[in-house]
Image: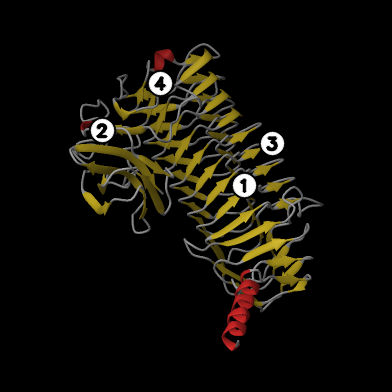
Amino acid sequence: MKKILLTIAALVLMYSNSYSQTTIPGGIVSGTWTHAGSPYNIMGPIMIPDGSTLTIEPGAVVNFQGTYKMLVIGQLIAIGNPRDSITFTATNTTNGWRSIRFDNTPTTNDTSIISYCIIKYGKATGPSPDDCGGALYFRNFSKAIISNCRISDCEASDNGGGIFCENSNPPISNNTFSNNVASNVGGGIMCYIGSNPTILNNIITGNSSQGNGGGGISCVNSNPSIIKNILTYNNSDSHGGGIWCNGCSPNISNNIISNNIAPFGGAISCNGSDPTIINNTITNNTSENGGAIFSANLSNPTITNNTITNNNALKGGAIYFAMLSNPTIRNTIMWGNTASISGQQVYIDDEGSDPNFYYCDVQGGASAFEVNFTIYTGTYQNNIDSIPLFMAESAGSGTGYNGVTADWSLQSVSPCINAGDPVGTYPATDLAGYPRVFDSTIDIGAYEFQGYVGVNSIHKQDGLIIYPNPVIDNLVVENTQKSTLQILNVKGQIIKTIHTDLPETTIYLEDLSSGVYMLKAITGNEVTVKRFIKI
């Protein structure tokens, strides 16, 4: 009888632990929120006071029961892990909750960390500034780290559907921003007045701005470093489907910017801005004016070693210049872009705009530029007009074709190899992280040819499925047969080998640097190869 009672007691205890929950009525919070005490049901606005810390353990769920905010005046430590994230969400996904907010948090407090968290259904509404920062809001505070998070389905009735920064520089790295919306500016991330964060290794996809611009990222009077991100399928109702630059000079380098949409600048729009745009593939974007880039109002971007290909517009398939825009374009491929009205590659709207081209590969050359006046008078020196010969380009121009999964590296016989500026300044590495210069002279485009045998020379078979692609940490491989799986870099060197007979295998890639890789599956006498991107 005693054994039966003990068994029943154990079952009751196990049942109660499985369904434990904690009610937070609102007000001051600190201490530790555990996985065992989860979910934490938030019944009112909460605040971490100055000098206090709230620590949230991996696996905990913070569930807002109404339109309440988390105000951080002290310190927030929310560190999950790759297999056990922390979740911030709302019971009513339509009304949402009011985001995590750092508003003039004292800089004397220790750094807050938000890592391996899922943040969704944040809705920033109400009077300013409550209408900014759907998931996270920063004003006059930079001592926070945002990394390895998934920020999705958040909204702002003004700016910053995902994250809003004002005079704040929190590093933002290795996150995924998806399906966030700003009614005005910055669907994914908004950098406003003096905000210069490093935005590194993020996937920014499916976000939108319904006002002035920046479907993915918006920079207004700020100079962030936008490095090694993938910006894809973002859209704006006005400027910059991927990135909008307004009165700023950000560093935009080593990014993949594809399949974005906006009326002005499908990928990037510059208004009174001088961004440095280096080592990017800017492909398969769509716009009315400037399929890839719109540059206007005294904008003078420096555009170096980019691959600007297969974009589509009404005017200026690649770039549209207007209102005294005088950028310098160097070592850049502009090929396969289309325009349904005029300027397949370049459209120049006014006589005061005189872009300068050096050592580029431009389809049709300067004679094919469409100018809305008498003649183009900019400098056009040492450029070529030759098919670039990419490894595996997308099948057509515009957002109907996938520019992310295409291979924009150069074949061994490409005319762009060793055809760049032999004496000019250039980046130390290419988009894949490999050295410039490989041979005698820098190549034209985002990728430097490394003298390797490319993926197209390897025998391929169908039947291998890999996802996600691009990948941050964990690559899932679906293959129905017993196989040897190998990860190879672009030089063909084997980095990892896994033997498996499982239909689904997860390969952990945390130790891999960002770049382009191949997954090779050897099954009997068959070899299957898939290309993927690690960010």
- Tell us which disc is closer to us: 4 or 1: 4
Visible residue check, residue 54 = no
The residue drawn where x is 65% and y is 68% is: 19
Query: Label 3 is placed on what type of residue?
Result: Gln
- Tell us which disc is closer to us: 2 or 4: 2
Q: Which residue is mark 1?
A: 221
- Tell us which disc is closer to us: 2 or 3: 2
Secondary structure of the residue carrying numbered label 2: loop
The residue drawn where x is 61% and y is 54% is: 194
Q: CA distance from mark 1 to mark 3?
A: 20 Å
Q: Which residue is mark 2?
A: 460
Vertically, is 506 above or below 267? below
Secondary structure of the residue carrying numbered label 4: loop
Asked whether the residues under the numbered discs 1 and 2 touch, taking CB atoms below 8 Å apart as contact, a structural biologist would say no
Q: CA distance from mark 2 to mark 4?
A: 26 Å
Give me the disc on residue 336: 4
Instruction: Give residue 517's position: percent from left, percent from top.
Output: 31, 44
Q: Which residue is mark 3?
A: 210
- Tell us which disc is closer to us: 1 or 2: 2
User: Mark 2 or mark 3: which comes first in sequence?
Assistant: 3
Label 1, residues with CA under 10 Å away: few <14, some 14-19, many ≥20: many
- Tell us which disc is closer to us: 1 or 3: 3
Asked whether the residues under the numbered discs 2 and 4 touch, taking CB atoms below 8 Å apart as contact, a structural biologist would say no
User: Mark 3 or mark 4: which comes first in sequence?
Assistant: 3
Give me the disc on residue 502: none
Q: CA distance from mark 3 to mark 4?
A: 29 Å
User: Mark 2 or mark 4: which comes first in sequence?
Assistant: 4
